[in-house]
Amino acid sequence: MTGEDVEMTQENVNAKRRLLTIATTGFGLAGAAGLAVPFAGSLLPSERAKAAGAPVEVDISKLEPGQQVTVEWRGKPVWIIQRTPEALELLPDMVDRLIDPDSNSDQQPEYAQNPTRSIREDILVLVGICTHLGCSPQYHPEIGSVTFDDDWRGGFLCVCHGSKFDLAGRVYAGVPAPTNLEVPPHRYLDDNRILIGSDQEAA
C-alpha cells in the first residue's frame, strides 16, 4: 500500500467519523425535543385539573326575573337566580325566621356578606347543596301559602329532611340544616357574564 493509499483511507475514516457525529447529534437533538414537548405539556393544566376547580363562565343575558339556571363547578351544582323586585323587598321581613340572617357564618366571601348575599342585588349565586346532609334542595320561587309553609316568601326546600332556605340562601330556624347555603367565589366579567370560581376584586 502506498503512502497515497494510506492518506485516502485516513480521509475516508475522517469522513465517516464526521457523518456519524452529525447523525448522532441530530438524533440527540430530536430526542431532546421529543422529551421537551411532553414536559412543556405537563406544565399546562390538564382536563382533570380544570374539572377539579377551573372557573366556569356563565352567560346570564337571557335570564328572566324569577328564573334559575344551574351550572357545574368543581363537581357541584351552582344556581344562578334572578330575583324579582318583590322577592328582594321581602328579604328584610325574614330576619325573625332565620338562624343567621346577617350571614355571620363563614358561608360566603366578604363581598357577599350583606343582606342579599350577592354582588348584584337581583342576581343570587349559590352552591345548590343542603348544608345538612348534602342533598340538593328544590327552588320554589312562589310567594304565599304552600304545602310546607303557610307564609312562604320564596326560596328553597330540601325535601329529604325538610330544611328551608330563603331567597338569599339563608337557613330557617328549627330545621336540620345548621348553616346558610354556600355562596361560591364569583365575579362579573360584564353585565351579562359571571365567572364562577374566581373572586371579585376588592373595590
Image (spheres, helix red, strand yellow):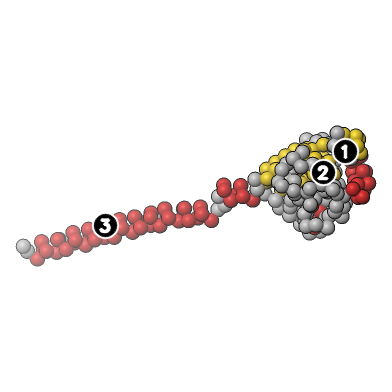
User: What is the CA distance from the residue labelled 1 to the residue labelled 3?
Assistant: 88 Å
Instruction: Identify the residue at image location x=80%, y=44%.
Output: 163
The numbered disc on residue 19 is: 3
**Sequence order check: which comes first, mark 3 or mark 2?**
3
Identity of the amino acid at label 2? Lys
Identify which residue, 12 or 119, lies in the foreground.
Answer: 119
- How would you rate the neighbour count of disc 1 (Cα within 10 Å): few for under 14, some for 14-19, many for 20 or more? few
State the image coordinates of residue 41 (x, y, percent, origin top left): 51, 52
Q: Which residue is mark 1?
A: 149
| Residue contact at pointers 1 and 2, CB within 8 angstroms | yes
User: What is the CA distance from the residue labelled 3 to the residue labelled 2?
Assistant: 80 Å
Identify which residue, 180 or 173, lies in the foreground.
Answer: 173
State the image coordinates of residue 148 (x, y, percent, origin top left): 85, 37
50 over 143 or under it: above or below: below
**Outermost residue, bottom direction?**
3
Instruction: Identify the residue at image location x=73%, y=54%.
Output: 199
Q: Which residue is mark 2?
A: 164
